[in-house]
């Protein structure tokens, strides 16, 4: 199978869906000739024209409000926010309108929109352009939240998000854009709410999201040299969440480490830990559940401090070793 980058996979999914359905269109800042902040939509305006690749003013409130309104009329907007931090400006339209309308009107109005946005640290973009705020979106009933970690997942999950009749927040980690993976050329869809076991193991389970999936797989390879067999589970979607896959994995291994890049306090890791603690997997635990997340600080601009603020491969290895080697 061919290999393409994560960025190319996202662009391919967008283009294929726009060719399929004239109601699908994109809107965002500089997404036309410039191709967006990270170049995802580069070249698309030549194929689809400015009516469907719509440059907008620098106003996330206007972009999100336009998307909600057009979705109500039957369009299927895909809005791009240049950085996920700017979701704060769009939050009223997202949390109070998009997430609520279908429920409040008894299903008579739907909001089939996708909010795409790059998230995460690692590019030196500092405190206002490097956050991981996925737990905010996951806390709002009515929103679906997706965090693909591979090129193949990005394409399949994006198609599913565009086809969905509910608002979906689609996080694309900046450092993943240049990574490559196997991606079929044909259209395909990965169901929202289905986790993927990236690596099977028997000694401990790591549930990791986005960039942390790759760090966890690297840690798992290092741990295998020490005779420790780690299972790495990627939820892929936070809402809906695949409880069954995670619970079954923990029942098998007896240990759980949750790793995410967002600040540990109030992060999605606490919810995942609680799901497992409240499930039948609790009786199978051989060690207390552990979480790794970012330090409770704004993301530093200094590259050394930025790197130190988020979980590292070394921290993952150390935690798993302590959990597996613990003697009661």
Image: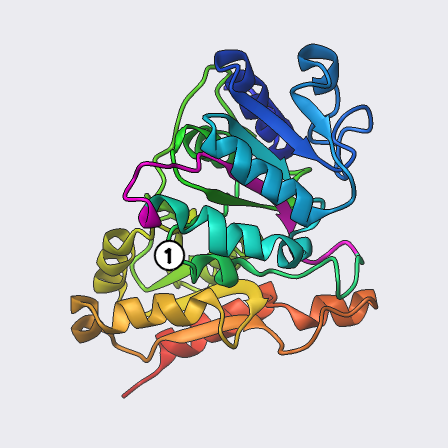
The way the protein has been coloured in the rendering is rainbow
Q: Does the magenta stretch include residue 246?
A: no
* Residue at the spot of label 1: 141
x, y (%) of residue 14?
57, 24
Whether residue 9 is visible to the viewer of this picture, yes or no, is: yes
Of 262 and 289, nearer the camera is 262
Left or right, 219 with respect to 81, comes to left
Quarter of the image where the C terminus is located:
bottom left
How many circles with numbers are drawn on the protein?
1
x, y (%) of residue 149?
52, 44
Of 273 and 252, nearer the camera is 273
Whether residue 158 is situated above or below residue 294 in the rendered picture: above
Q: Quadrant of residue 92 in the image?
A: bottom right
Q: Which residue is drawn at 66% across and 61% down?
A: 131
x, y (%) of residue 169?
51, 46
Q: Quadrant of residue 77 in the image?
A: top right
- Range drawn in magenta: 103-123
Q: Quadrant of residue 156 in the image?
A: top left
The kind of secondary structure element at disc 1 is: loop
Q: Residue at x 44, y 58 (%)?
A: 138
The secondary structure that most of the magenta stretch takes on is: loop
Q: Which residue is drawn at 40% across and 61% down?
A: 206
Whether residue 158 is situated above or below residue 247 in the rendered picture: above
Whether residue 151 is visible to the viewer of this picture, yes or no, is: no
Of 252 and 119, nearer the camera is 119
x, y (%) of residue 104?
34, 50
Left or right, 295 with respect to 287, comes to right
Q: Which residue is drawn at 66% across and 32% down?
A: 27
């Amino acid at each position: 199978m061919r290999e393409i980058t994560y960025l190319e996979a996202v662009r391919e999914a967008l283009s294929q869906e726009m060719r399929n359905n004239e109601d699908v269109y994109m809107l965002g800042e500089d997404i036309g000739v410039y191709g967006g902040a990270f170049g995802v939509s580069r070249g698309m305006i030549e194929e689809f024209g400015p009516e469907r690749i719509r440059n907008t003013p620098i106003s996330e409130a206007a972009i999100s409000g336009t998307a909600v309104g057009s979705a109500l009329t039957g369009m299927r907007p895909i809005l791009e926010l240049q950085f996920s931090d700017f979701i704060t400006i769009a939050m009223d339209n997202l949390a109070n309108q998009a997430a609520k309308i279908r429920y409040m009107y008894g299903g008579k109005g739907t909001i089939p929109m996708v909010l795409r946005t790059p998230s995460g640290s690692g590019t030196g973009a500092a405190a206002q352009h490097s956050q991981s705020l996925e737990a905010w979106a996951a806390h709002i009933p009515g929103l679906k939240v997706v965090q693909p970690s591979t090129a193949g997942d990005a394409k399949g999950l994006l198609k599913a998000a565009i086809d969905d009749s509910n608002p979906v927040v689609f996080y694309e980690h900046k450092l993943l854009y240049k990574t490559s993976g196997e991606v079929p050329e044909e259209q395909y869809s990965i169901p929202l709410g289905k986790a993927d076991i990236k690596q099977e193991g028997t000694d401990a389970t790591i549930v990791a999201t986005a960039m942390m999936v790759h760090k966890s797989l690297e840690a798992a390879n290092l741990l295998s040299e020490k005779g420790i067999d780690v299972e790495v589970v990627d939820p892929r979607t936070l809402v809906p969440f695949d409880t069954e896959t995670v619970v079954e994995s923990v029942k098998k291994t007896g240990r759980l480490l949750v790793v995410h890049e967002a600040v540990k306090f109030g992060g999605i890791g606490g919810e995942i830990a609680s799901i497992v603690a409240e499930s039948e997997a609790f009786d199978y635990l051989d060690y207390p559940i552990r979480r790794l997340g970012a330090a409770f600080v704004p993301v530093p601009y200094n590259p050394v401090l930025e790197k130190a603020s988020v979980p590292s491969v070394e921290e993952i290895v150390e935690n798993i070793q302590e959990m597996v080697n613990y003697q009661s």
